[in-house]
Image (tube, rainbow, N blue to C red):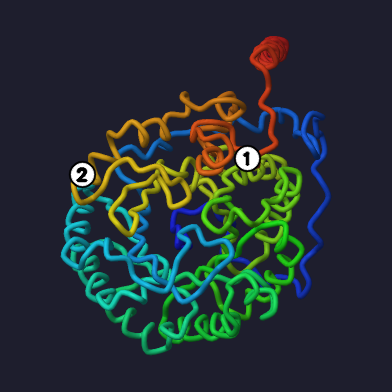
């Protein structure tokens, strides 16, 4: 399962000249690292936390609603959150229940969430075109996250485009067939993914390309980036592994490596002809804010960028996930159910359940995330915090940032006031 097509996503500019033939090597660690963590912690950044949130609490409605239509899939991906298998589960929501779910989406009011039909492989559902049409007939946006299996054909994409699918996501976890097919567990998926990107272009379907970030794929990311322009994608989304499902057999990159990688992503994003975003790595925003401040951008200018438009969005805050059997989660990677669509109203669950409300309340966050001056804009991966600590409100362990202590903040405010007084 891939969470995809985040139209609100944390991205870099999409309008830029073509990238260089060879991207630069992923740079070394940023300066100013504190001791106390393998690789060190970045220290406090004067002035870089001054971008203040206005409206970054998505309490009325999620921006993206992911519906895992089925766990059936012809692939055996090594990182599959859903631990998908070949057979469809008898507890899947029926067509009628799916239409009832779409009716419930209307209860959020305008603007409504955008629905991503995902899985498993949603192409395993014969009623997929009917449910896409039902969504579009209700004025609900629709995206598709198919698997690269024989069900994914040019004709299938054309039919789904006609039904109302607005864009799709495809996954590429290696720059060649050996690396990618090794992750997907089936030969031929690399070649099919490349073909599917071409079919989508023919059909007029924008494509988001998803790439897994683990210790095994890290060194291959520049080569995958090199391949992206030939696929005609609108967005490259790098999903930082959450160790759930089959992904428990893989290894996340280190906090220091994540800092280096994000610095590289910001650099290539300046010239890439597509957007670059991260998934389950919201501390990309902190690094982006620092970088844009260093470039002389004001807080207002930062807030208007594609990165700024994604501020605050995270699991449970702008994101909602419906499991194949109707369980309601803050995201597919945070498997804590707050209700079930067969008995609960998704609007009420999203707005009022203690779980969702706590995830939107940064004052409830603990550890470094609780003290961080970026927590309203970033908020950390609540899924990773839950995976590693059992508490979705704890610190995201992938982020190495150490917020300034309260006395440091007070001292800085006094110094700033004194400077202003002298200048006056």
Q: Earlier in the sequence, mark 1 or mark 2?
A: 1
Label 1 sits on a secondary structure element that is: helix
Residue 299 placed where, x, y %? 57, 37
Name the residue: 59% across, 39% down.
388
Query: In the image, which disc is placed on residue 123?
Result: none
- Residue contact at pointers 1 and 2, CB within 8 angstroms: no
Residue 98 placed where, x, y %? 22, 62
Locate the C terminus by quadrant: top right
- 233 relative position to 113: left or right: right
Residue 92 placed where, x, y %? 28, 63
422 vs 268: above or below: above
Separation (CA) of disc 1 from disc 2: 36 Å
Name the residue: 37% across, 62% down.
116
Please tell me how many numbered marks the rendered image carries: 2
Q: Which residue is mark 1?
A: 286
Residue 51 placed where, x, y %? 56, 34
Q: Nearer the viewer, mark 1 or mark 2?
A: 2
Query: In the image, which disc is placed on residue 344?
Result: 2
**Mark 1 neighbour density, 10 Å: few (under 14) some (14–19) many (20 or more):** many
């Amino acid at each position: 399962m891939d969470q995809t097509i985040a139209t609100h996503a944390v991205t870099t500019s999409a309008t830029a000249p073509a990238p260089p033939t060879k991207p630069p090597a992923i740079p070394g660690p940023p300066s100013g690292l504190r001791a106390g963590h393998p690789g060190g912690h970045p220290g406090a950044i004067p002035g870089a936390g001054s971008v203040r949130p206005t409206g970054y609490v998505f309490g009325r409605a999620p921006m993206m609603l992911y519906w895992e239509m089925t766990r059936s899939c012809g692939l055996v991906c090594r990182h599959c959150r859903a631990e998908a298998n070949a057979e469809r589960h008898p507890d899947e929501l029926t067509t009628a229940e799916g239409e009832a779910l779409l009716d419930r989406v209307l209860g959020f009011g305008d603007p409504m969430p955008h629905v991503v039909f995902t899985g498993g492989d949603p192409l395993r559902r014969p009623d997929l075109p009917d449910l896409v049409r039902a969504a579009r007939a209700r004025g609900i946006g629709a995206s598709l996250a198919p698997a690269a299996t024989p069900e994914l054909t040019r004709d299938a994409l054309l039919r789904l485009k006609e039904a109302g699918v607005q864009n799709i996501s495809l996954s590429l976890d290696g720059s060649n067939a050996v690396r990618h097919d090794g992750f997907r567990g089936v030969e031929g998926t690399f070649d099919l993914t490349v073909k599917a990107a071409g079919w989508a272009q023919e059909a007029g379907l924008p494509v988001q390309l998803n790439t897994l970030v683990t210790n095994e794929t890290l060194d291959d990311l520049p080569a995958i980036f090199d391949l992206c322009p030939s696929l005609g994608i609108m967005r490259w989304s790098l999903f930082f592994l959450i160790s759930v499902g089959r992904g428990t057999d893989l290894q996340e990159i280190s906090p220091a490596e994540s800092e280096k990688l994000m610095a590289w992503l910001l650099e290539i994003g300046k010239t890439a002809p597509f957007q670059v975003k991260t998934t389950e790595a919201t501390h990309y925003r902190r690094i982006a804010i620092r970088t844009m401040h260093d470039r002389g951008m004001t807080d207002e200018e930062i807030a208007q960028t594609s990165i700024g438009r994604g501020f605050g969005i995270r699991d449970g805050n702008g994101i909602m996930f419906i499991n194949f059997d109707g369980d309601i989660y803050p995201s597919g990677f945070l498997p804590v159910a707050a209700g079930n669509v067969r008995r609960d109203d998704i609007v009420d669950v999203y707005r009022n359940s203690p779980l969702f409300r706590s995830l939107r309340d940064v004052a409830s966050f603990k550890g470094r995330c609780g003290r961080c001056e970026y927590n309203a804009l970033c908020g950390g991966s609540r899924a990773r915090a839950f995976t590693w600590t059992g508490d979705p409100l704890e610190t995201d362990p992938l982020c190495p940032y150490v917020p300034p202590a309260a006395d440091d903040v007070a001292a800085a405010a006094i110094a700033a006031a004194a400077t202003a007084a002298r200048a006056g």
